[in-house]
């Protein structure tokens, strides 16, 4: 039986409203779960700069949260290394800073989280400082976290991730073996200039005696350059904070 135009329009409107309500309700229900999962993943990435991926993989979500709470504290700083506690009248925490959104702002307007890794059972003893990284790879965004030892120079560990690098090539930045190449490298040269750590073109050479260079990834030169630029840029943005910590340590040693 042919239906009138009014019937069809009414039915379409009712169907649209019902579907809209269902989608809205689903979003309300799943939203908190999604945010909790995102927060957990971020904690794993942060911790991945200071403990092994195998150790993290063996933890339950509750254990990850407990480990993070017990071992990590955090601050937010600006590009001058000054601590920021609020912005536009709202409180600011390192865990809630969206690095990707901040990346779209001019460097001097961004917020820069710092995650501080403490010794087990001692909130006063610091073992590492962990800094977020963000940049561009071959096809899409790349990001990660780099840990510096308390000398604020030696790399203690790094985690790297990507949104769309080529499988088997640029995507290898997520491999533990590639990330392990950064451990023990230094970000300042003998003159005190920030040079970061550079992934070289090609793969298979020995850079163990080079404090600022690591072996590259075959067929992934552009991704490697993206990682190099990301490291140099973001460590540069944190340089004022890093230098202030180095100065405080020098004074304490007197």
Image (tube, rainbow, N blue to C red):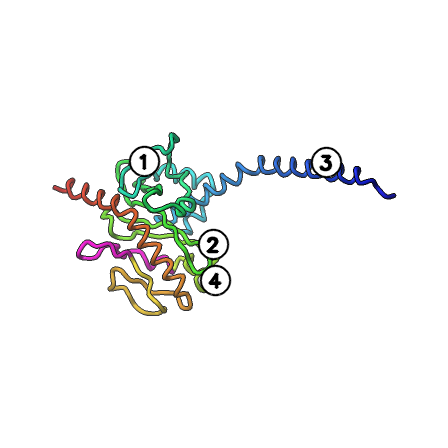
Secondary structure category for the residue under label 2: loop
Residue pointed to by mark 4: 166
Mark 1 to mark 2 CA distance (whole Å): 29 Å
Residue contact at pointers 1 and 2, CB within 8 angstroms: no
Mark toward the start of the polypeptide (3 vs 4): 3
Task: Please give the label number shown on residue 84.
Answer: 1
Give the farthest residue toward the top.
89
Mark 2 to mark 4 CA distance (whole Å): 10 Å
What is the chief secondary structure element of the magenta stretch?
loop
Nearer to me, 210 or 196 = 196
Give percent across and percent down for residue 19.
67, 39
Give the farthest residue toward the front.
5
Residue pointed to by mark 3: 14
Give percent across and percent down for residue 90.
39, 31
Residue pointed to by mark 2: 163
* Between marks 1 and 2 in the image, the one whose residue lies nearer the viewer: 1
Mark 1 to mark 3 CA distance (whole Å): 49 Å
Where on the picture, by quarter, is residue 249? top left
Where on the picture, by quarter, is residue 160? bottom left
Q: Which residues are magenta?
A: 178-196
Residue contact at pointers 4 and 1, CB within 8 angstroms: no
């Amino acid at each position: 039986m042919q239906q009138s135009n009014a019937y069809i329009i009414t039915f379409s409107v009712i169907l649209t409203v019902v579907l809209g309500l269902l989608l809205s309700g689903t979003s309300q229900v799943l939203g908190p779960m999604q945010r909790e999962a995102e927060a957990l993943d971020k904690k794993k990435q942060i911790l991945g700069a200071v403990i092994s991926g195998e150790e993290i993989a063996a933890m339950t979500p509750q254990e990850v949260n407990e480990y993070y709470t017990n071992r990590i504290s955090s601050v937010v700083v600006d590009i001058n290394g000054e601590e920021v506690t609020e912005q536009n009248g709202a409180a600011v925490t390192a865990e809630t800073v969206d690095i990707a959104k901040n990346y779209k702002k001019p460097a001097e307007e961004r917020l820069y989280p710092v995650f501080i890794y403490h010794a087990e059972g001692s909130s006063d003893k610091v073992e590492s400082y962990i800094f977020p990284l963000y940049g561009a790879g071959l096809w899409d965004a790349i990001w990660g976290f780099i840990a510096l030892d308390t000398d604020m120079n030696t790399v203690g560990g790094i985690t790297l991730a990507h949104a769309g690098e080529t499988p088997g090539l640029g995507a290898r930045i997520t491999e533990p073996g590639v990330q392990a190449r950064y451990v023990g490298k230094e970000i300042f040269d003998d003159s005190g200039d920030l040079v970061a750590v550079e992934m070289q073109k090609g793969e298979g050479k020995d850079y163990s005696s080079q404090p600022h260079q690591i072996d590259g990834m075959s067929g992934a030169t552009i991704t490697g350059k993206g990682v190099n630029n990301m490291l140099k840029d973001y460590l540069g943005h944190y340089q004022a904070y890093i230098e202030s910590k180095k100065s405080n340590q020098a004074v304490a040693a007197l």
